[in-house]
Amino acid sequence: VADTPWLSDEEQRAWRGFNQLARQVTAHVTRELQRTTGLSGPDYEVLVLLSEAPQGSLRAFEIGTAAGWEKSRLSHHLTRMELRGLVRRQTCEADPRYADVVLTDEGRAAIEAAAPLHVEHVRRFFFAALTPEQVAAVDGLAETVLEHLATESTEPPTCSSTDCG
Amino acid sequence: VADTPWLSDEEQRAWRGFNQLARQVTAHVTRELQRTTGLSGPDYEVLVLLSEAPQGSLRAFEIGTAAGWEKSRLSHHLTRMELRGLVRRQTCEADPRYADVVLTDEGRAAIEAAAPLHVEHVRRFFFAALTPEQVAAVDGLAETVLEHLATESTEPPTCSSTDCG
DNA sequence: CAAGATTGATTTATCAATCTTT
DNA sequence: AAAGATTGATAAATCAATCTTG
């Protein structure tokens, strides 16, 4: 901690802006999604993953990994979606410790109806404001930081941000 | 909806990357904040706002506006923070419909102890990955999109994203 | 024992009134 | 009636066991 310098003015602005950006864009998009389709953000995410999977089916933990959820949240959420008829769970007969999650017909209908609306919202609240260069910048930023986070977690004890010499 | 085109490959990547970025950076930072200081993200946000306010005091709705929370969430959260001794509520005598939220000594101690740690986490999980140009890009993106969202909401009925002529 | 999964309890967030003051 | 605030009920996310299989 010792010698960690404060954030510069520009960093401060960038950090607060980044947070506001993330929060507000997400809020606008998910509010419209909810209003126009009845699906929550998490609902939509699960449905997209399943709809893009080979047989409309994934192991539960694959969804959890992709969405970045812990397993209990995943299980509870799948239970709610199952009650609404959007997905179905079935134990994998080959390997009974895995749970297969399958997109139902109703679930597929829901995601297919929702997708174009969602795209419209994303355009309206996000891409409409951006130049092609800015879109590229977003893509680059995401790649850079996510790459960094992936390695950051698997690094030595951490003498991070302090000079070790 | 009609003529809304699908997202291009690059837009698709940018949108998914943006979401992953926002989620993962936030997750890393708030997890470390919680672990090292015992404060949640929302706790920290309220404390920062109060610590930067003139008398360490704000009207409740000002916090709600700044944080983008609805009033019931705000009220519940303030109740929890008050129980922990971080803030104190007092009715404004001049205008009894407003509730003043005041930072307690304990609350100020908490934010002052947490701030440098938080800065370190933000550096480690975010700025460490970015060049100065990228920091500027983040700042610019946030400004652009937030400006757009501010006007978007106050616009005509919405013939958004469809050609009107 | 480790990994996948589920369950129940607790904590937060959201929703729908309600209350007060202007 | 409108705006600020609170309250109680519901829904969702997190936490701490537990269970099963390899």
Image (cartoon, coloured by chain):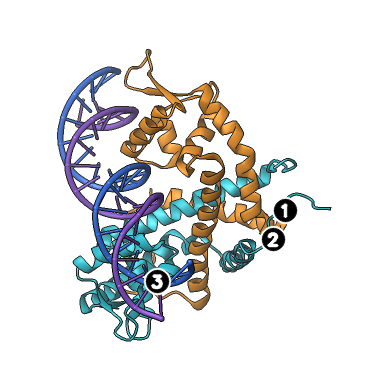
Chain colours: A orange, B cyan, C purple, D blue
Name the one closer to the observer, B154 or B102: B154
Q: Position of residue A6 (x, y in %)?
A: 41, 76
Circle nearer the N terminus (1, 3): 3
Q: Position of residue B84 (x, y in %)?
A: 20, 66
Instruction: Specify whether residue A155 is in view.
Output: no
One can see residue B4 in this view: yes
Q: Which residue is denoted by mark 1 in the rendering? A: B159
Output the chain of dot 2.
B
Secondary-structure class at tag 1? loop
Mark 2 packing: few (<14 Cα in 10 Å), some, or many (20+)?
Answer: few
Q: Mark 2 — residue?
A: B156
Q: Nearer the viewer, residue B107 or A34?
A: A34
Relative to B80, residue A83 above or below: above
Q: Which mark is residue B16?
A: none
What is the quadrant of residue C19 in the picture? Answer: bottom left
Residue receiving disc 3: B61
